[in-house]
Image (cartoon, rainbow, N blue to C red):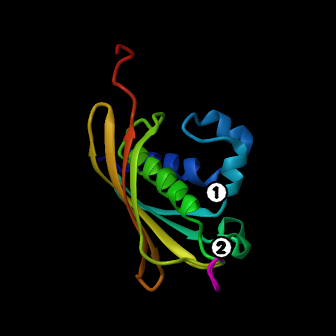
Amino acid sequence: MASGSHDKKLETARRLLEETSPAEAEQLPSLPSGFYDAFVLKGIRVVQALQPGTLLCHFTVPSRLLVSKLACSAPNSGGFLHGGATASLVDLVASAAFTTAGLRTRGSPLEMNISYLDAAFADEEIDIEAKVLRAGKAVGVAVVELKKKSGKIIAQARYSKYLGAASSKL
């Protein structure tokens, strides 16, 4: 792939994940609402597209995405990255990885299987790496891994998404 084309795809992924103003979100049809952008997306930094279909991001866990200690009945529970926030990060970064492979991402997630292996806490820097395993005419499959800087895995996910049919005929 030509370097200019690769750079353009990386920039598209960066725009999808890092630019979160409501006006910009409306121009990018694959992004969710402005509220959601500010709540989850804010703080994702695209590091590099290692190759087409592979994307590495850094994310500092904000306190707004933690499980509340009041919401947990077990002693000493809470204060860690919420599972729903983790699922949202999987969805967003995997979708951006599809764009680095030159694929449309206007479709909906079909399936997500996430193994939660460890906890991430407020202000902890984590890496999120997504890799497209396969992309057909209408469905794509990716894997996503969230890791601590120490290398310890926080979560592993397998993600499938409807990419949109190649034509408008059903």
Across and down, in percent, residue 64 comes to: 71, 66
**Image quadrant in which you'd find residue 99:** top left
Across and down, in percent, residue 155 comes to: 43, 69
Task: In this rendered view, identify the residue nearer to me: 150 or 119.
Answer: 119
Disc number lying in front (2 or 1): 2
Magenta-drawn segment: 72-78
Q: Which residue lies furthest to the top in this view?
A: 169
The rendered magenta stretch, by its main secondary structure, is classed as loop
Does residue 20 show up?
no
Residue placed at 51% from the left, 57% from the top? 87
Quadrant where the image shows the C terminus = top left
Across and down, in percent, residue 113 comes to: 38, 56
Asked whether residue 73 is drawn in magenta, I would say yes
Which amino acid type corresponds to the residue marked 2 in the rendered image? Answer: Cys
The correct choice, above or below, for 108 with respect to 130 in the image is: above
Asked whether residue 120 is drawn in magenta, I would say no
Does residue 123 show up?
yes
- Is 103 on the left or on the right of 125, as rendered? left
- Is 162 on the left or on the right of 57, as rendered? left
Disc 2/disc 1 C-alpha distance (Å): 21 Å
Crowd class of label 2 (few under 14; some 14 to 19; many from 20; radius 10 Å): few
- Is 43 on the left or on the right of 30, as rendered? right
Check contact, mark 2 vs mark 1: CB within 8 A. no
- Is 69 on the left or on the right of 94, as rendered? right
Task: In this rendered view, identify the residue nearer to me: 16 or 159.
Answer: 159
Which amino acid type corresponds to the residue marked 1 in the rendered image? Answer: Val
Q: Report the residue marked by disc 1.
A: 40
Across and down, in percent, residue 41 comes to: 62, 56
Q: Report the residue marked by disc 2.
A: 72
Crowd class of label 1 (few under 14; some 14 to 19; many from 20; radius 10 Å): many
